Amino acid sequence: MAGLFTVGEAIRDTKAPGGPVQDQWEARRFGAKLINPANRRRLSVIIVGTGLAGASAAATLGEAGYQVKSFCYQDSPRRAHSIAAQGGINAAKDYRNDGDSIRRLFYDTVKGGDYRSRESNVYRLAEVSSAIIDQSVAQGVPFARDYGGLLDTRSFGGVQVSRTFYARGQTGQQLLLGAYQALERQVAAGTVEVHTRHEMLDLIVIDARARGVIVRDMVTGGLETHLADAVVLASGGYGNVYHLSTNAVGCNTTATWRAYRKGALFANPCFTQIHPTCIPVSGEHQSKLTLMSESLRNDGRIWVPKEAGDGRHPREIPDDDRDYYLERQYPAFGNLVPRDVASRAAKNQCDAGRGVGPGGRGVYLDFADATARLGRAAIEEKYGNLFDMYRKITDEDPYQVPMRIYPAVHYTMGGLWVDYDLESSIPGLFVIGEANFSDHGANRLGASALMQGLADGYFILPNTISDYFAKNPSTETIDASHPEAVKAADAVRGRINTLLTINGERSVDSFHKELGSIVWEYCGMERNAEGLQHALGLLRTLRAEFWTNVKVTGANEELNQTLERAGRVADFFELAELMCIDAFHRLESCGSHFRTESQTDDGEALRDDADFAYVAAWEFTGDNSPPKLRKEVLEYHNIELTQRSYK
Amino acid sequence: MNVTLRLWRQHDQDAAGRMVSYGVDGISADMSFLEMLDVLNEQLTAAGDDPVAFDNDCREGICGMCSLVINGIAHGPEGRTASCQLYMRHFHDGDTIDIEPWRSPSFPILRDLIVDRSAFDRIIQAGGYISAPTGAAPDAAAMLVPKKDADRAFDAAICIGCGACVAACPNGSAMLFTGAKATHLGALPQGQIERNSRALAMGNQHDAEGFGGCTEIGECTAVCPVGIPLDMISRLNGDVLSALRHNST
């Protein structure tokens, strides 16, 4: 469809050094210029977001001696949404002697991502994975241990080894508290300043380099200009574009979207992960969805009644009348197939009328066999907090009746495009963690998000950012009166004033819900050309209504949560369009991106490597001008592209 | 169901506050307590009034942002539950429900039900960490940790830092929060070197923030959404005494 986008120049250089993949990181580190410790204290870095990536980067750069300013919208850095990650963190330690290695973690991650990630970055991720576990243990992260005092591990989807380290069902919490404590230690040391309840509303670019941010003090409404020698975005993913997701309700795209509008490329926005094991929606009022960790698939068995409309209580349905469909369809991986495969399989069962619970949008996750085999105490030890959470939300006891689960939006593989150094297409703007696109291709494997966030923050960014500083000395001292800084602040102020003066009839939340339902319907678990074009029409109409009919109460100069949400939803509207354009242009299925036009005879995702083995990086060209597609062709020298099979 | 809410409205830190009543209709038993407040806020917005400000984020009981005193009990009547994990099925049609912010001089009210808990961050800054700069770590398996110590550390480490302990304590003490951190890090071999100095520094900061002393009443542990036990305060006290005895600084 002409007019939706244009095609620009390809991206040729990712800055990954040449040579064998296993030598590249060492080569890059050696090739990177260093900054002498005495000079580091003259260099400043802004870091937006305090999740695993942001907190670990702030702590590490503070330890190195840089002046760090860290920002988060929550009231404490410890509350960033990494805290909610449940299941675990992967590392190629091979403590189990089960054939694991750096190369196997690399291979599993590239394959799990359905061959749409960059080999150089993924290999490096696997390479530093072990050091993350070492670092976290040294900080006092209480990982699960066996009776000999050694670290325990478990298996996650898409792999056949046991390499996932965990802290009961609260691994993200424990890893984040480790990074948060390291960060607060640097606050006490005077190297890091933390600004809580501050939200980034724009990026300041001066002489084609990222030099600062405009933030809003969410208590007073004051707009502040902060300047630095480099800016790091660690602001997380954009799953809340769907309104209902497993994200915290405050998670948003504003920081990354504003950077996109200032020239940073946005890569693969349509690659969004729908997690198979979430608690189903219970009604119209629903404000968020809750994940039940993938680790449950180690012991739980997923099934639906064989007969559509079987209304019997699950305990009264005998084994012969149940379809353990994952075990049947994917005997090699069974219940531990990757997330995209498990989610679509659940959707197919429900579409065929075999779903359970309200509206038939659910499948059973059953622990009866595991409880009989291991005993209730063992199940409690492993999953107790998850079972408690399930009971609180549904009022059902999963020790007695099977859980009901359904897929929900969970993670976004897409994000700002970065090179091997994690630098975006704007020099001096680095992007780490979920906010970038780099490592998970078209589908992220379980327990890899925590690994990537901490790899980026503790080990990768601190090495690459010094090279940037060394090669780009800031010659000019700038302050908030610089014309570009003033222009950015004025633009933010203008936008806030517009939102406050529309004074229409509809609430921000009602727009967000409608936006979310459009994206979920047409750019969710299945997409096709017709639906995506229809969605674009709906989105443009709704966006126009938003800017003429939204009602934002109160003023800017006060704590105003409605105003905060309005700004975020406004950016989600624009992002949603880019997601649909990206999904429309990628006329193949891969990982989470399932185009109904491109499937195998048995309904699996059918990739088109000849035409689509590239990263789709989008360039902003103006509000009324179509985005420009910049392709980064993916080259595979170490892994052979095959049809992904988990059968 | 329909409920009447009596909740604390206060425009900003310096303004006077008061309890205001609102009726909310059409609540279902499957709604969470915060979703019920969302309904109220939609209603207020439609009427052109300012919605009620309240802290919340993950809405799954782990981030520690939500902080409501419900019918006089921090996080409400359920026990072992953060405000966001409380469901309306625990209330009845026609109920009147009181909602207030955490009350503590160390947690100033910023607006309505939102308070400033930055004092907790400053207690952590004072010593709530193990000094382990990035890159300096030995292999994770180099030091064995007895399972019971790892489990003890974990049971303390799950504190979500919400501040309900302070809100519930008649003395306004944050000893349960501080004790949980001292216990978490002090139970592990990695945390031994700084164990006493950490406890002393965090304890001093706790007092400097204006939190009260512990007289072992136990209200804190009764409302704690993750069930941090009272004996973690004894552990903190033990480490502080040790520090004083050995002149740790």
Image: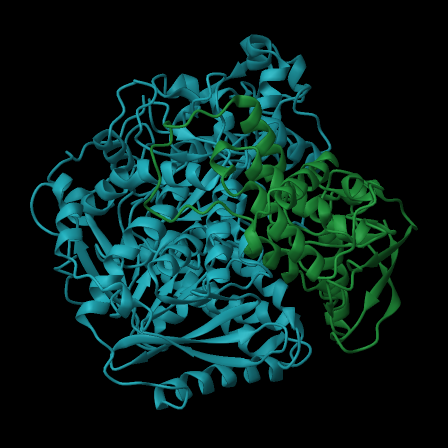
Chain colours: A cyan, B green
Task: Give the quarter of the image for residue A7.
Answer: bottom left
In-image side of B220 versus B65 (left or right): right
Total residue callouts: 0
| Quarter residue A431 falls in | bottom left
Q: From this view, report whether residue A533 is shown above or below residue B222.
A: below
Give the left or right position of residue A251, taking residue A411 as reference: right
Task: Residue A427 in the image: state x and y as whole percent.
Answer: 24, 70
Q: Is residue A182 above or below residue B219?
A: below
Whether residue B227 is visible to the viewer of this picture, yes or no, is: no
> Which residue is nearer to you in this view: A84 or A631?
A84
Question: Looking at the rendering, which quadrant does residue B179 occupy?
Answer: top right
Question: Farthest left residue?
Answer: A19
- Horizontally, residue A58 falls left or right of residue A100, namely right
From this view, report whether residue A408 is shown above or below residue A498.
Answer: above
Q: Is residue B11 left or right of residue A494?
A: right
Q: Residue at x 39, y 37 (%)?
A: A340
Q: Where residue A33 sits: x, y (%)?
A: 16, 61
- Say if A300 sits above or below A233 in the image: above
Residue sitting at x 58%, y 70%:
A564
Q: Considering depth in this image, is B85 or A363 the residue closer to the camera?
A: B85
Camera-side residue of B206 and A146: B206
